[in-house]
Image: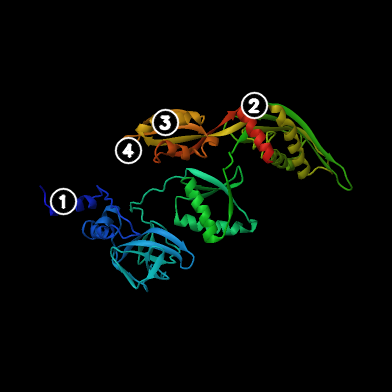
Amino acid sequence: MPGSDEVYGQLSKDLAEDLIVPVFMGSGEHGNGVTRLFKALRHDVPPPSVAAKRLGVSMNGSFSASVIKTLNQQHTGKLSVARIWHGEITEAGLIGETKPSGLYRLMGGESQKITVAREGELVALGRLQDARTSDLLTLAGPLRNEDFIWPEVPKPVYALAISPRNRQDDVKLSASLARLIEEDPTLSVEHNADTHQMLLWGQGEIHLKIVIERLKSRYNVEVDATPPQTAYKETIKRQVKQHSRFKRQSGGHGQFGDVQMEIKPLRRGEGFEFVDKVVGGAVPKQYISAVEAGAKEYLSRGPLGFPVVDVSVTLVDGQHHSVDSSDQAFKSAARLAMSEGLPQCSPVLLEPIYEVVISVPAEFTARVHGLVSARRGQILGFEAKSGWESWDEFKCHMPQAELHDLIIELRSLTIGVGSFEWQFDHLQELTGKLADRVMESHRAEH
């Protein structure tokens, strides 16, 4: 039977090679197990130099430390929590040209000011504005250490559309979110150009609820949060010729613009095309760009109420007036032609379809099949997840409208471990009752 020295020696070796992760049971509140944890940290874990080598930390120079977390506190400001790999730093030391506002040892919610910190310690440095989580701190300054093995930030899987309850808090909200994202890189903010919403992205419903509560308690910013809107579009299915005239007469110069246009659909994904086929100066060259601008402007909200995509507009003829024609008149004529012509082009609703990759333990594979089908998804295939024993990876197409709370149901079906990644793939025609419901809801909102 091996002796205790041999057992603990092997444990220390396996720990140093990152082969095992010890788990200790205890209660910090009552002090249970804390002494045993301290003993393990003292006797069993490898020295900082071994961990630094395994993680790819450069040991050049007289001092190095890695920022493992960033905190923004109300009274002390920004704190960069760092693990010191070698050397020491004093409260008067410099990181590049910046002197930290203080050197602290964190004890729960309290910060204890200290004068020096040495190899192996975990300390907080005050107000290093240029430092961010995962940076390597040296006496030359913060470095972006590309060799440092740092966990990849998981992609966001859940979003809420947020807006400040008090409209005067717009700037304050942006600044507060920037500080929270600095603390938690799994958060992100997106200003969606299609829906004109500010989207707060994170790792789940509870995650974002905590962030919204922190906005209120820490920064005194209250926000309204709703599920994000789906970025529906519309397009046309048939071609029409449209002749429209904009004429307005009042005191002084009037307004006159006359256009004849062909409106036709393009293949999916080709966007907007404008073609000038006017001959003989029926529409003077200086007004052609105004016609294009007017046509393009109308496409921001088509006959179904959504942005119009994949449309070709050809200006074939028109008329002008030597006195009353202007850029604005021809721009208005083009908008009028589009508003009169597009409803005749058999407009249809398009919904965004995303490529979704779902990762789950193999024992839950059958459940995921049902989940994808219930959300109008189309499974493209699945295979064993590379590097993950007994895990499967599904690839499927799924409408954006079905993605909002997907992570909640997926985690519920997989004891909290399933996840997914997504990216936009294409727009797909939506018809029938679902399309009617979308358009009725959109009309009610607007």
Question: What's the residue type where badge 1 is placed?
Answer: Val
Secondary structure beneath dot 1 equals helix
Residue closest to the eye, 281 or 253: 253
Local packing at callout 3 (Cα closer than 10 Å; few below 14, some 14-19, many 20+) is some
Q: Nearer the viewer, mark 4 or mark 2?
A: 4
3D distance between C-alphas at marks 3 and 4: 19 Å
Quadrant of the image containing the C terminus:
top right
Which comes sooner in the sequence, label 2 or label 1?
1
Q: Is residue 221 above or below residue 433?
A: below
Residue closest to the eye, 291 or 129: 129
Dot label at residue 237? 2
Residue under numbered circle 3: 367
Which comes sooner in the sequence, label 4 or label 1?
1
3D distance between C-alphas at marks 4 and 2: 46 Å
Residue closest to the eye, 237 or 334: 237
Query: Mark 1 and mark 4 in contact (Cβ < 8 Å)?
Result: no
Local packing at callout 4 (Cα closer than 10 Å; few below 14, some 14-19, many 20+) is few
Query: Mark 4 and mark 3 in contact (Cβ < 8 Å)?
Result: no
Question: What's the residue type where badge 2 is placed?
Answer: Lys
Locate residue 10 relative to residue 178 in the image: left or right.
left
Locate residue 282 relative to residue 76 in the image: left or right.
right
Locate residue 225 relative to residue 181 in the image: left or right.
right
Query: Mark 1 and mark 2 in contact (Cβ < 8 Å)?
Result: no
Residue under numbered circle 1: 7
Question: What's the residue type where badge 4 is placed?
Answer: Trp
3D distance between C-alphas at marks 3 and 1: 43 Å
Local packing at callout 1 (Cα closer than 10 Å; few below 14, some 14-19, many 20+) is few
Which comes sooner in the sequence, label 4 or label 2?
2
